[in-house]
Amino acid sequence: MTYLRHALAARVGEFIQLRRDIHRHPELAFEEHQTSELVAAKLAAWGYEVHRGLGGTGVVGTMKRGNSDRSVGLRADMDALPIQEQTGLDWASQVPGRMHACGHDGHTAMLLAAAHALAQDADFTGTLHLIFQPAEEGGGGALRMMQDGLFARFPCDAVFAMHNMPGVPAGHFVFRDGPAMASSDYVTIKVHGTGGHGAMPHRAADPLVAAASIVMALQTVVSRNVDPLDTAVVTVGAMHSGQANNVIPAMATLELSVRALTPQVRTLLEQRIKALVEAQADSFGVRAEVVWKPGYCVLVNTVKETNFARQVAVDTFGADRVTLHGPALTGSEDFAFMLEQVPGSYFLIGNGDGESAGACMVHNPGYDFNDDNILIGANYWVSLVRKFFTH
């Protein structure tokens, strides 16, 4: 193990440069062709059996050692976001309107660094599956890989994923068993009325006024229908209606983001939102159409695997660098779909806090992954794999 850590430290500069190269050439969901080819080429050169094309641009690298029937999967995401970078860094995005604003370039580099070290480890006995996933950012790439037979072709006894988190000290690990990240559903509400002259509102049925009332009424779903001890979010992120001040429009549209930390609350939110919207619309003499698009499910970490993952962090880095049970997050992650099929855990590694550059929040044009985490994260993955196969 000491040898592997020295090997990682000696070559970490190579993986920092690799991360920055990926950062310069960001690719959106299901367009990660250059990134997936880079990943596949590296894995093949290190002796992994490489499988391309799962979920379109996904890559799985497999290495089997010995006769053990134990298997583990490690997942990293690869896609970027449609954001114009404003960091001014030497390795800033060279593609207008696209950037790695969530650190997936770093996640990929961490797992590749670990893959290189583990390829030289003759001691572990079992099957290692390295899962490089496309389209985490709303595209459901995890589900697409599973639909292409991910766990049927590459069965795993457990699966793990790590994500950076600004606002947490760099290299500090945060774990949580049970519900850890929220479901995420997308709702479009179309309010159909009767247009007319702004000076004669009694001759029309105003969908804009009804929509405004719906926006306010929706706030009561969380405050009056959901148990105060549960977590739920209903956000109206967009409202579109009309083009002129003297014209009552015929339709108004609302766009919602709806999140919950349990399937029961998720179901309740759908029921109450639909009932409330229809009742509000009827009270204004207009008609509402609710289009509900299910997104990611609640991410639930299994207790056994999370206990194992957190103990790996404590043993490797010390208890002072580990939060044993952090707060749940209302953000969403499609690794949740993998955890519906295979036990496992999704956890966080701090990207930086305070006034440090790593504290800039993800999905921000000023964000950048903390390169110090490449060595730390790779060391963690190596420790987890070795302990998993001797556990």
Image: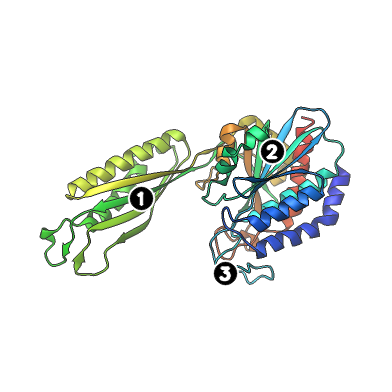
Disc 2 target residue: 73
Q: Is residue 232 left or right of residue 288?
A: right
Q: Indicate which disc residue 258 carries.
A: none
Instruction: Categorize mark 2 by other alpha carbons within 10 Å: few (<14), some (14-19), many (20+).
Output: many
Disc 3 target residue: 96
Residue at (55% x, 41% y) in the render: 143
Q: Are marks 2 and 3 in contact (CB under 8 Å)?
A: no
Q: Is residue 33 left or right of residue 275?
A: right
Q: Is residue 93 left or right of residue 317?
A: left
- Is disc 3 placed on a helix, strand or loop? loop
Residue at (57% x, 50% y) in the render: 135
Cα–Cα span, label 2 and label 1: 36 Å
Residue 259 position, x and y percent, is: 44, 44
Above or below for 225 versus 87: above
Disc 1 target residue: 188
Amino acid type at mark 2: Gly
Residue at (82% x, 28% y) in the render: 67
Q: Are marks 3 and 1 in contact (CB under 8 Å)?
A: no
Cα–Cα span, label 2 and label 3: 34 Å
Dot 2 or dot 1: first in sequence order is 2
Residue 132 position, x and y percent, is: 66, 47
Which corner quadrant of the image does residue 238 belong to? bottom left
Check the picture and name the quadrant holding the C terminus: top right
Instruction: Categorize mark 1 by other alpha carbons within 10 Å: few (<14), some (14-19), many (20+).
Output: some
